[in-house]
Amino acid sequence: MAVSFELLAVDAGTGARRGRLTTPHGVVETPAFMPVGTQGTVKALTWDEVWATGARLCLANTYHLFLRPGADVVEALGGLHGFTSWPGGFLTDSGGFQVFSLEGLRKVGDDGVEFQSHHDGSYHTLTPERSIRVQEQLGADIIMCFDDVAGWGVDEARLRQATERSLVWARRCRDSHVTDQALFGIVQGGFDEGLRRTSAAGMVELDLPGYALGGLSVGEPKEVMNEVLAYAPGLLPTDKPRYLMGVGWPEDIVEAVAAGCDLFDCVLPTRLGRTACALTAEGRVNLRNLQYERDDGPLDPQCDCATCARHSRGYLRHLVKANEILGARLLTYHNLAFYQRLTADLRAAIECGTFGTWLSAWRGRGVTWAGASPTATP
């Protein structure tokens, strides 16, 4: 297997983990946040800028690249790394979540999913085998099993069906996988502890090189997600990476690290950057607010990124109000740097044996970033 994981330290009080994920395209220190490069690009930034934020592993989207430009095209141009020129690692999702999001445009069955393209209405089919083949063509370092996602609020029968189907599909994914890319399984089960335990046990039996927790951050209240995180990471092997999919806000990541998760991805930092919002040590800043018009201070006094080092809040607000592309670029860069600095702080605290103290201080500040998210394309 071309990807390996080493567990370096565990916080005795919480189970927070410090690890090292080695890929063919470099080392990823964990806990780690993966910027989302949906269509082979992290929106608004160059790959050099993404690297400069500290990111070493990025996510690309199977569904979107399958539709445009097509897996054959990406493969012909050297896979994702040759196609994009990103020097770090890539992880591709399976397309399961995107298909789940196509309400009214898809039909899920035991064999796979039939769906209509959101681009032109054309019909396509993704099966576990096809998802794996597409991801092999894309050439990411880490690929994901195709899963059936059940959202918040579904009935017990649908939740059980999605859980059982995801296990069957994971076996089909494993059996059809022929490259040395690391194939991660996805634990489903929604918010039912019994189903979560059943799903985790079945996934662990497959002896895959890593595991993800799926079916969270799908509309449920935050306290419900935290109830699942109180036990779900502990159902997974200690010697393999644990990936919490699609999460999230800074406070969510901190609590998930305390629960024993290692890898994270979310569109929030880039989406917020394109909608005039910045994540700072003191919470969210909306640059559209009039109070920043004459503010000559840095966006975040505790941040040393290029945006904060060179530009004032007043200038950034001007760019936002003038609809200048540079505004979205500078805010996106800062937000990604914020996440990379946060995960670096988490790693240092776990490694030094001071995570419990760090966590208490973090919680004691009472700062939250979550709220109604601006509507934008991921």
Image (tube, rainbow, N blue to C red):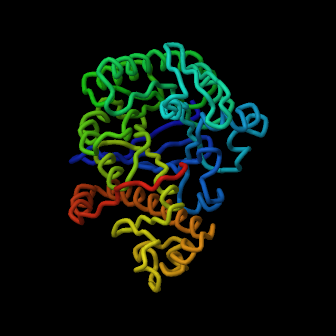
Placement of 133 over or under 339, stated as above or below: above
Seen from the viewer's position, the closer of residues 65 and 33 is 65
On screen, residue 358 versus residue 66, left or right, reads left
Vertical position of residue 132 compared to residue 336: above or below: above
- Compared to residue 310, the image places residue 20 above or below, namely above
Task: Give the image quarter of residue 250.
Answer: bottom left
Image quadrant assignment for residue 302: bottom left
Residue under the point 42% across and 39% down: 243
In percent of width and height, residue 253 lies at 36, 50
Q: Is residue 223 left or right of residue 181?
A: left
Q: Quadrant of the N terminus?
A: top right
Q: Closer to the camera, 156 or 348?
A: 156
Between 76 and 297, the one lying in front of the other is 297
Give the answer, above or below, for where 250 lies relative to 139: below
Q: Nearer the viewer, residue 333 or 288?
A: 288
Q: Residue at x 41, y 45 (%)?
A: 19
